[in-house]
Image: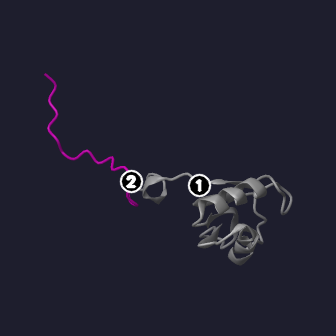
Amino acid sequence: MKIFVAGLPYDLDDAELEEIFEKFGTIASAKVVMDRDTGKSKGFGFVEMPNEVEAKDAIENLNNISLGKKPMVVKAADDKPGGGGGNSGGGGGYNNNRGNFNRRRF
C-alpha cells in the first residue's frame, strides 16, 4: 500500500522517514519529495508498505502526530493514472488527443 505523508519537517530525509514507519512493519520504500530547483524538501513524501494491515496500522497511529511545528497528515495515497505530472502531455494516463477527425454537423 502506498501512503502519502505531509507535514514533514523540512530537514527530514528518506532514511528518517523509513525509520518512523518501520516500527509498524516492512517498508518497501520511503521517499521525501524534493524540489528540483532548490534541492530542498517540499515537506511531504510517500511510503510503500507491502502488508496492507501494517500500512493501515501505521496510518492510524501516525496521522495527526507532530514531528515538528505542524501535525503530519498520513493517509492512503490516491492512485493517479500515469503518475501525475499535470497536463504536460506526457506520462501516460488519459490521452486528450482527439486526432484529425472530420466532424461534420448535419
Give the labeled residue for mark 2.
93
Q: Secondary structure at mark 1?
A: loop
> Which span of residues is magenta-colored?
89-106
Q: Is residue 58 left or right of residue 31?
A: right
What's the residue type where badge 2 is placed? Gly
Residue, x 65% and y 73% (percent of image)? 39
Q: Secondary structure at mark 2?
A: loop
Determine which of the numbered discs, if any, sits on residue 86 in the image: none
Which residue in the rendered view is the most extreme toward the right? 69
Front one among 78 and 102: 78
First reached walking from the N terminus: tag 2 or tag 1: 1
Measuring from the top left, give residue 67's x and y in whole percent: 83, 63
Image position of 34 with respect to 80: above or below = below
Mark 2, Cα crowd under 10 Å, few <14 / some 14-19 / many 20+, is few
Image position of 30 with respect to 99: above or below = below
Measuring from the top left, give residue 20's x and y in whole percent: 76, 69
Quadrant (top left, top right, bottom left, bottom right) of the C terminus: top left
Q: Is residue 86 left or right of residue 93?
A: right
What's the residue type where badge 1 is placed? Ala
Give the labeled residue for mark 1.
77
Measuring from the top left, give residue 46's x and y in whole percent: 62, 64
